[in-house]
Amino acid sequence: MRLVCESVGHKYGALDVLDGIGLTVADGECLAVVGPSGCGKSTLLGIMGGLVEPTAGRVFVEGAAPAGSLNPITYVFQDFALLPWRSVASNVALALEHHPLDAQVLAARVDDALARTGLREFRDAFPKQLSGGMRQRVGIARALAVAPAVLLMDEPLSALDAQTRELLMEDFLALWLAARTTSVYVTHNLHEALRLADRICVLSRRPGRIKQIVGVGVPQADRALPAAARAMAELAEQLWHAVRAEAVDAEREVADG
Amino acid sequence: MADRRPVPFRGGGFSPIPVRHAAAIGFAVLLALWEFAVRHGLVSPLFLPAPTTVVAALGDLWTAGTLWQHVSESLVRLIGGWCLGTLAGLAAGLAMGVWSLGRAVGVPLVSALFPIPKISLLPLLILWLGIGEASKIATIALGVFFPTVIATYSAIDAVPRNLIRMAQSFGLPARDVLRKIVLPGALPGILAGFRISTSIALILLVSAEMIGAQYGIGAFVLQAGNLMLTDQLLAGVLLISLLGLAIGTGLTQLERRLLRWR
Amino acid sequence: MIRLSRRAAVAGAFATISAPAALRAQTLRKTSVGVLRLSSSGPVFIAAERGYWREAGLDVELKFFTAAQQVPVAVTSGDAEFGVTGLTASFFNLAGKGALKIIASQSREAKGFPLVAYMVTNAAYDKGFRSVRDFAGKRVGITTTGSTFHYELGLLAKKYGFELSSVTLVPLQTLPNMQAAFKGGQVDAILAPVTLARALTADNSGKVLAWAGDETPWQLGALFTSPRAIAERRDLVERFVRGYLRGTADFNAAFNQRDAAGKEVHGTNFAETIGVVARAVQQSPELVAVGLPFVDALGRLDVGDIYNQIAFWQQAGLVGRDVNGREIVDLSFVRGHLNVPKS
């Protein structure tokens, strides 16, 4: 399934947040969106997911969702958004309960999602008993359970410590490589973008406009290889250069009040 | 090195740790002092009856067989009034919590009506509902209603919006968002509100039983006060606080069961 | 609080001739009396305003309370040295613990003085509740158990031979509650103070069957103090009673006069005296004139009735069996008490 943004813009009252975003996420592609804080990355993702109403432009999906997809456009949240009063399995089940599924089918889907995220032995734990990384695994399991056609991830690792982030990133990559679900990955961390994305979209400071879209030539599986090191380093340099200019200006703007 | 000194410990304190049996011992010492002061004429028994006298007054009620009558009539009013006020308060609080128009209309109304001393409405309640059980139950229900409304809609406000967005992102219908996200999320706040509303119900018991009640703990306390029978007065007060303690303990148990996840 | 009348000013002027004002003021002994703003406390207001206590060597502070129960409590706790108010079960419970002694009378329910009405609702009246003999089986609103209204019904029950236990007494705590219950028809009858009775008859909400004073005269109120004051400051108590009795005499002379046919006539200094009372109770003189009780000119008590009150409350289980009338009443301050039981 493809996701298409047509000159999407957004204003909070007088504040111009996003302006003229035209973007197509190809079927099976992972697009990262990076940019300085406050550039409207999360708002853009909200608009793509139908959680924020754009004040200009529209978002479309094109193509059929894969068979068995219950919730074509599915979110993974920065703060996990788990229900503290539900167990791990029950949190995953929440995404399925309102669909007309047999109890066994539902249980099987939950089991499968838990198995893929390594959460089987934690199925009866409550969120407060889990570490941050485990909690985000629940968030991912919940998203996998509905077999999404488009996965929208809003800084999914930024609430975690550095080591956990590395570990989860590896898991992400493995899951994504296995399924190749169309994905949009919003982050302020270039390292994550370079590791996961096929293309990286740099947004300017507020009002967010597309400054640059960079394709990462190297396949995800090969990026950690020594042979790719030079190309990856150059790309990182180029991206950082683009983001840095915006970040410096955004910083000044905030300081000027 | 010659000039070597240990670093002195300077932390600690300012963090109370539970001391076993301290509460019970403190309470017992206080009661003993009180009893001693009255027995030895340091305090006139008229001004402050000794604990034993108060317990004896309670014992008299028991032997006269009226204790249960007082307690049961009060319980009927308390339970009836509280349930009525709570159900209405939950409904209104929910409407105000999730519905903008309900909020716009409700908040100023609650602000205007909450502070009215219910006792000043007794003559009106008598005119509307008579002097039977209805007006007594209504007095308690009115007192319970407003704090429940406030607790409910504040509790709904306190439900993290991102959980609601999450539910919407998975396509949960509005009814399910309410049932699976909003209500369970508001439960801790609502239960905390119950502590306040049950206390208010107990406080209003005396007011409610001002309306022509022959039996009831409130009526008993009122009559003891009117007759200057201070030992009976304190016996009645003791009953009310025991009732309060029982309700509080019950609510703690309920919270432990329902809010295990916290 | 109470403005000095001309007479008091004159008395003060004479005093300055014999001694400097400051010295004179120093010799006055300070004391206090707890009262309600009711016309039945008229003798207190009169004695204060006309300087009768000043002339007896006392500087009396009036302490105002809002409910009859508060006055004996204030005397018990020492907030006031004397008190004047109606007698209730609560009073006897306090007095029975050795905290109070009655020394003179205040108002009395008496024939021809409409103070408290037996009022029935129109509905009850239409159903045949037309006489004070018909109370059995009815619902009657009173303020509280142990109140003067409660006792008045007890006296009525005794007089007409019905069982008080056959009457459902509904304690409603306040007069507004009683009024609401009466108007709403939730009780068949109430005992209504004269102002409430007039208001209810004026808007045709019910009918007055009779007045308590006409049916069952009794000793409604009294002047009292603490046993300690009598034991330790007998002289001060005597001076206080002296001033108070000049107040009762003025009150009686002005307000309690009746002609041969029993019709009310204005007595000595009526207008000025009613002004004194009206200012103290903060109501119009016209309103005060409507509800003036009988006060014995000599401050004599109906001692037999006080004993009867105690017996009545004891029988109702509202006053302890150990309370003894003889220990509560001190007959030595006023001469010629009425109806004194022979021991």
Image: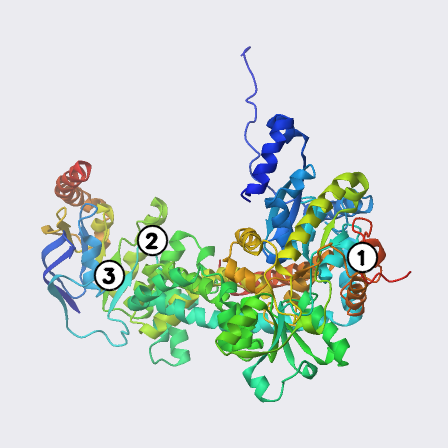
Closer-to-camera residue (C322/C39): C39
User: In what element is the residue under mark 2?
Assistant: helix
Q: Position of residue B114 (x, y in %)?
A: 43, 61
Q: Are marks 2 and 3 in contact (CB under 8 Å)?
A: no
Q: Which residue is mark 1?
A: C337
Between disc 2 and disc 1, the foreground one is: 1
Q: Position of residue C72 (x, y in %)?
A: 69, 52
The image quadrant that residue B41 belongs to is top right
What is the spatial separation of the Cα atoms under label 2 and label 1, in whole angstroms? 102 Å
Residue type highlighted by circle 1: His
Between disc 3 and disc 1, the foreground one is: 1
Q: Is residue A81 above or below residue C125?
A: above
Residue type highlighted by circle 3: Leu
**Residue A187 in view here:** yes
Q: Are marks 3 and 1 in contact (CB under 8 Å)?
A: no
Q: Are marks 2 and 1 in contact (CB under 8 Å)?
A: no
Q: Which residue is mark 3?
A: A152
**Residue at image x 67%, y 45%?**
C80
User: In what element is the residue under mark 3?
Assistant: strand
User: In what element is the residue under mark 1?
Assistant: loop
Closer-to-camera residue (C12/A128): C12
Q: Which residue is mark 2?
A: A168
Residue type highlighted by circle 2: Leu
Between disc 2 and disc 3, the foreground one is: 3
Residue C317 as seen in the image, left or right of residue A30: right
Q: How many C-alpha atoms fall within 10 Å of the one at disc 1: few (<14), some, or many (≥20)?
A: some
What is the spatial separation of the Cα atoms under label 3 and label 1, in whole angstroms? 100 Å
